């Protein structure tokens, strides 16, 4: 299975990085990575990761400026794409088919080929323009999966929350993983 991971410049680049870390441990998944300039900046600002170490997690790395990359064509078969995190600018580019970068072009290709596109928008609070973009993307076939933490799994750390959120996105691609603490029904409070 081939999966594209796009990291744009929204806060929360750790979601894309963790996605790559998890996918690296799952046999049979080939990852294709594209990072926007804003994504590269946020990796530096928000994490202790070096760009080359993030890129080393992927099987193939594509420049966001290379509109002739394999992932820019529908004839290059993939299972789909995750944009983690997605800026509102990236979301707008996807919704409006304004494919002036590889990240947006790859997402556009995934939609036109009726493959799975999961967008993890990272913005708050949201105004009507943001919610309209998410609505339009959903109408086009994208799955909107904001990285909102769950608490039924009783997370102890931020890593627990990140792992659960990313694991749930992997679920959308039917990728079995051990990162999601599955709901097993309610329990009485002590």
Image (tube, rainbow, N blue to C red):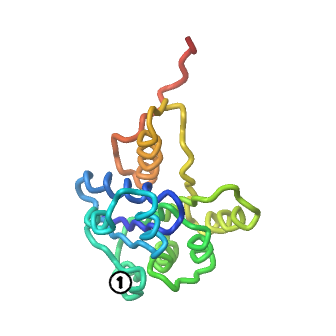
- The residue lying at 48 percent from left, 80 percent from top is 105
- The residue lying at 23 percent from left, 54 percent from top is 27
- The residue lying at 27 percent from left, 62 percent from top is 57
Q: In the displayed structure, does residue 97 sit left or right of residue 109? A: right
Above or below: residue 55 compared with residue 93: above
- The residue lying at 67 percent from left, 68 percent from top is 133
List x then y, in percent, for residue 190: 55, 11
Quadrant location of the N terminus in the rendered image: bottom left
Which is nearer the eye, 118 or 156?
156
Residue 129 appears in which quarter of the rendering?
Answer: bottom right
Which class describes the residues within 10 Å of circle 1: few (<14), some (14-19), or many (20+)?
Answer: some
List x then y, in percent, for residue 146: 57, 54
Q: In the displayed structure, does residue 24 sit left or right of residue 79? A: left
Which is nearer the eye, 172 or 114?
172
Q: Which residue is mark 1?
A: 69
Residue 146 visible here: yes
Total labels drawn: 1
């Amino acid at each position: 299975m081939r999966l594209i991971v796009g990291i744009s410049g929204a806060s929360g680049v750790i979601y894309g990085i963790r996605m790559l870390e998890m996918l690296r441990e799952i046999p049979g998944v080939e990852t294709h990575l594209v990072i926007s300039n804003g994504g590269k900046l946020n990796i530096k600002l928000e994490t202790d990761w070096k760009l080359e170490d993030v890129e080393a997690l992927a099987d193939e790395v594509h420049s966001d400026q290379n509109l002739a990359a394999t992932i820019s064509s529908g004839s290059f078969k993939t299972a789909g794409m995750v944009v983690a995190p997605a800026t509102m600018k990236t979301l707008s580019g996807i919704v409006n088919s304004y494919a002036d970068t590889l990240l947006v072009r790859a997402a556009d290709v995934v939609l036109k080929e009726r493959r799975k596109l999961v967008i993890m928008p990272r913005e708050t609070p949201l105004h009507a323009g943001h919610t309209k973009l998410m609505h339009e993307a959903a109408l086009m076939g994208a799955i909107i999966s904001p990285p909102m933490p769950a608490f039924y799994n009783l997370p102890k750390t931020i890593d627990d929350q990140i792992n659960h959120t990313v694991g749930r996105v992997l679920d959308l691609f039917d990728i079995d993983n051990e990162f999601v603490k599955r709901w097993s029904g309610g329990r009485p409070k002590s």
